[in-house]
Amino acid sequence: MPFDPNLIVGLDRWDDAGVYRLSDDLAIVQTVDFFTPIVDDPYDFGRIAAANALSDVYAMGGRPITAMNLVCFPAKKMDISILREILKGGMDKLKEAGVALVGGHSVEDSEIKYGLSVTGVIHPKRVVANAGAMPGDVFILTKPLGTGIINTAIKAGMASKEQIAAVIEQMAMLNRRASELMQEVGVHAGTDITGFGLLGHACEMIQNSGVGMEIIYSSVPIFPGAIDFARTGLVPGGTYRNKSFRAGMVEFAPDIPEWAPDILFDPQTSGGLLMAVPPRKAKGLLAKLKEAGCARSAIVGKAVSQPAARIIVRP
């Protein structure tokens, strides 16, 4: 890769977004994300896709300022009103985030896809990378797990109206306040939980930090119904890929429920932030998160010195 002394975070790291220094006190954060519909309502799909794309900037501790639409749409097969609703959902979420839409690109495709390219700003010395956790740090998760499982149940026609409403609300929820509080209180590391699941992204946090992690399964917030669906084997295909990819880094205690790996490796859409917090700050940050609307935030584990680069899941 070409060397650039101003590139703070690039492709050589397992991080959420790229960060490039413009001056001593200003850097830009850049990311891009798009996917196929995961819910039936096009407006909700637009909101979720936008929140998901913005999340990578929030995960780095940055403030998103501009965005560009990325659209694939089967114009000859679907009414243009569907696309209009998708874009409206995305625009409303950008307005909520205080982000300006500055353009975009669209192509005709056989399948709908929508997302955003997002640019944010941050002070170069305040970048929150996913590596950096220290022994004794407490890990806080700000949203419950199970979006992939519930979305699979939605496609199978097995999810209740209440489950659908709950998962849509959380996926469309911005990580903005969680990110702001993360910067305000101060953390050692952070990431957002998306396609690799909690354990997949946790592995990214520890593999270059020189620490290991203990996850307490009973402390992990989970969407109502997700466990019941997991027990029946109703999980997305991405779960199995996630488990296979990180199998060598994760150890489950003997008395962990057999469905727990499917929950912890469940690929999330617009999931919460996972933060490595100094112990003295954890209780205060958790209280502030809940006051700010992140009601399901929870302490889910801690960083340990040994075994390094491994995760142990306990009951």
Image (cartoon, rainbow, N blue to C red):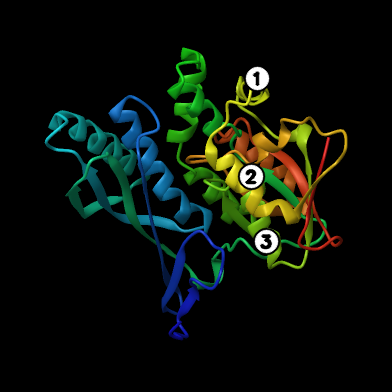
Instruction: State the quadrant of the C terminus.
Output: top right
| Label whose residue precedes the other's in the sequence (1 or 3) | 3
Could you tell me residue 270's position as x and y percent?
48, 41
Is residue 25 or residue 14 the one in the foreground? 14
The disc labelled 3 sits on which kind of residue? His
Q: Is residue 285 visible?
A: no
**How far, Cα to Cα, is label 1 from label 2?**
19 Å
Q: Which residue is mark 2?
A: 198
Judge whether 223 appears above or below 97 on screen. above
Which one is earlier in the sequence, the residue at label 1 or at label 2? 2
Q: Which residue is mark 3?
A: 188
Name the amino acid, label 1: Asp
Distance (Cα) linking label 2 and label 3: 18 Å
Which residue corresponds to the image point at 45% horizontal and 40% vertical from the top-left?
Answer: 174
Which label sits on residue 87?
none
Query: What is the quadrant of residue 157 in the picture?
Result: top left
Q: Secondary structure at mark 3?
A: loop
Marks 2, 3: nearer the viewer: 2
8 shown above or below 121: below
Q: Nearer the viewer, residue 164 or 286?
A: 164
